Image (tube, helix red, strand yellow):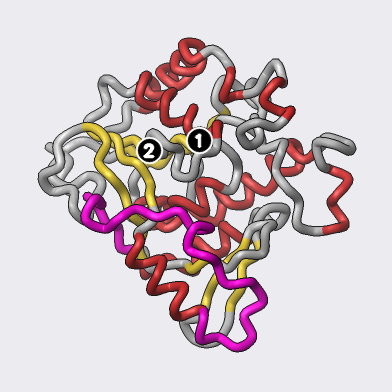
Amino acid sequence: MTLTAAPRLLLVHAHPDDESLWTGGTIARYAAAGVHVTLVTCTLGEEGEIIPPSLRELAADAADQLGGYRIGELRAACAALGISDHRWLGGVGRWRDSGMAGVAANQHPRAFAFGDLGTQAGALAEVIADVRPQVVVTYGPDGGYGHPDHVRAHEVTMAACDAVDRVFFAVTSRRATEDGVAELARIADLPFRLPEPAELPVTDDDRITTVIDTSEVVSVKMRAMAAHPTQVTVWHGGEGERAYALSNGVAQPIPPAEFYLLGRGPGEGAESDLFGGLA
């Protein structure tokens, strides 16, 4: 990093756990380096599927208390990653998890993906004006895998970030994912099902503009992921063996790097550092 001003990084994520799954290593690396990291979460994740049977009654179709429970999970994940500045977009519970496309939750009056874009962008613009980040991270136009809340988080971010030096989109690398799955396939006692190619959306590596080495903080990322037990199961095997699964039980590798597309701003110097080349 060559910034003369104190570096400030802001991340916009749709639900609790996204910060750890998509960008946990990046957050941990920059927070440990003294960067001011701000996380904005857009919903409480009320519509998430629940892994532990003992917590099933928290679900949206039962007690509908999952969102409140996930506040505690996110607090623990933030502590693991070194985030001291976390904010809920518009305040706690202002917008609700919309669920996947085509489900009844899309019709909820507070559904994030179908709320007023101008109001949502205005709420984020207030945070940006307060924090004054040089770099903002969110998802690409497809939300990474098409979830309506991820798509809306992208739209909100792009509408609010005119004054930001750089905007990056978090993606997954085809090469790193395929290599990771190949390694998992060699593990005899892997507790998850190996994925079919279509189950792990990836980005071709020739499109990736920025690779952040997270090898020194993989254990931190895994602790943050494990702080979301309603949504994520983290597995440690032998030396270097690691994976996680969501409620579908599909094994996903945890590479020693995280990957980004430059969405806005100058690219020179950004190949391995989100702040690289910024004055």
Tell me which numbered mark, 1 or 2, is placed earlier along the sequence: 2
- Please tell me whether residue 270 is drawn above or below residue 148 in the rendered image: below
- The image shows residue 190, relative to residue 275, as above or below, that is below
Indicate the secondary structure of the residue bearing disc 1: helix
- Residue that numbered label 2 is attached to: 140
When asked about the image quadrant of residue 54, the answer is bottom right
Question: Is 161 on the left-hand or right-hand side of 54?
Answer: left
Q: Which residue is drawn at 31% across and 49% down?
A: 260
The answer to if 209 sits in the magenta stretch is: yes
- Residue 158 on image: x %, y %: 35, 25
Please tell me whether the stretch drawn in magenta is mainly helix, strand or loop: loop
On the image, which quarter does residue 45 sit in? Answer: top right
Res. 86 visible in picture = no
The three-letter code of the residue at mark 2 reads Gly
Seen in the image, is 130 located left or right of residue 78? left
Determine if the magenta segment contains residue 222: no
The picture places residue 5, in percent across and down from the top left corner, at: 21, 35
* Residue 35, horizontal then vertical, whole percent: 33, 46
Residue for point 49% across, 27% down = 152
Q: What stretch is highlighted in magenta?
A: 185-213
Q: Name which residue lies at 89% across and 38% down.
A: 62
For the residues marked 1 and 2, what is the alpha-carbon distance in whole angstroms? Answer: 8 Å
**On the rendered structure, is 3 left or right of 225?**
left
In front of the other: 12 or 184: 184
Q: Nearer the viewer, residue 206 or 48?
A: 206
Q: Name the residue under label 1.
A: 150
Q: What residue type is labelled 1?
A: His
Say which of 203 and 57 sits in front.
Answer: 203
Q: Is residue 247 above or below residue 60?
A: below
For residue 242, say whether it is visible.
yes
**Image location of residue 23, percent across then percent down:** 43, 51
